[in-house]
Amino acid sequence: MGNLMEKQFLVDSFKKGEAWRLFKIIGEFVDGIESLHEIGKAVTIFGSSRLLPEDPVYKKAEAIAALFAKNGFAVMTGGGGGIMEAANKGAAEAGGTSVGLNIILPYEQKPNPYANITIDFNYFFIRKVMLVKYATAYIIMPGGYGTLDEFFEALTLIQTHRIKPFPLILVGSEYWGGLIDWIKERVLKEHCISEENLDIIQIMDEPEEIIKAVQKIVIV
């Protein structure tokens, strides 16, 4: 178990004289770009890996993904279970392109069976680049630390003009409302962000509302 755990800490494992590992990183970038370059317009859907098929949020993610697929969008996820599985399933069963960018973790993630394009990554940061680079919108379902990480990274990249602005939609006003209230009441009032930075974020609940918001920006 000890050796397996050590293999999981890929960034920590870099040592002097191991710059050759950079070629593995470059290889993952090349594989990702070569595999995804032709998928066309796509949305990336994030959310908890822990939610089960009977959960209403799982069912909503499935419906949202199906709606995007029917409207000509590819659907990308992190390739695992929970909301990722729901989104890949919804897209695949609607006849669309269903992309799973799986992260290789010894104890946690196994790729779901619904992605019709699957790519494995060892490094989170490379997978993040792919999920941003080929997205025309981010659809963020309820989730935990990983989902928050992806949300705030995309938010920061848009705020700092490192990527072109695209719809950044939080799904579930009840789930996300408290976070946005905190940002307004603390972060904004403490002058840590500007008023216009709040305009990057949208909160929505209904699948039809979400697809219309994206279609206003993106022509498929």
Image (spheres, rainbow, N blue to C red):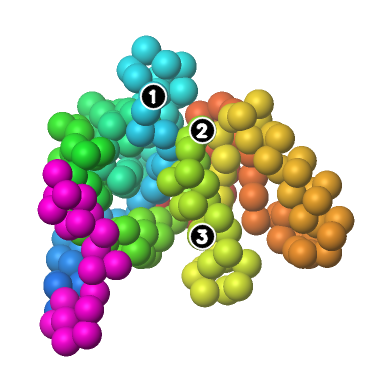
Q: Amino acid at mark 2?
A: Pro
The residues tagged by marks 2 and 1 sit, at their Cα atoms, a distance apart of: 9 Å
Query: How many residues crowd mark 2 within 10 Å: few (<14), some (14–19), many (20+)?
Result: many
Mark 2 and 3 residues: CB-CB less than 8 Å, in contact?
Answer: no
- Do the residues bearing badges 2 and 1 touch, measured as CB atoms within 8 Å? yes
User: Taking 125 as reference, is 13 left or right?
Assistant: left
The residue shown at (14%, 73%) is 24
Residue 37, image x, y percentages: 23, 64
Q: Which residue is mark 3?
A: 153
> Which residue corresponds to the image point at 24% horizontal and 74% vertical from the top-left?
14
Q: Position of residue 49 (x, y in %)?
A: 35, 33
Residue 118 at x, y percent in the picture: 16, 47
Q: Nearer the viewer, residue 151 or 72?
A: 151
User: Magenta span covers which residues?
Assistant: 1-22
Comes first in the chain, label 1 or label 3: 1
Q: Which residue is mark 2?
A: 142
Can residue 55 be seen from the camera position used here?
yes
- Was residue 4 drawn as part of the magenta stretch in this picture? yes
Label 3: how many Cα within 10 Å (few below 14, some 14–19, many 20+): some
Mark 2 element type: loop
* Spatial CA span between label 1 and label 3: 23 Å
Element type at marker 3? Answer: helix
Choose top left, top right, bottom left or bottom right for residue 16. Answer: bottom left
In this view, the residue farthest toward the right is 189
Indicate the amino acid at tag 1.
Leu
Q: Which residue is mark 1?
A: 51
Q: Quadrant of the N terminus?
A: top left
Q: Quadrant of residue 175?
A: top right
Q: Is residue 194 magenta?
A: no
Residue 76 lies, in percent from the top left, at 32, 46
- Which residue corresponds to the image point at 50% horizontal and 70% vertical from the top-left? 163
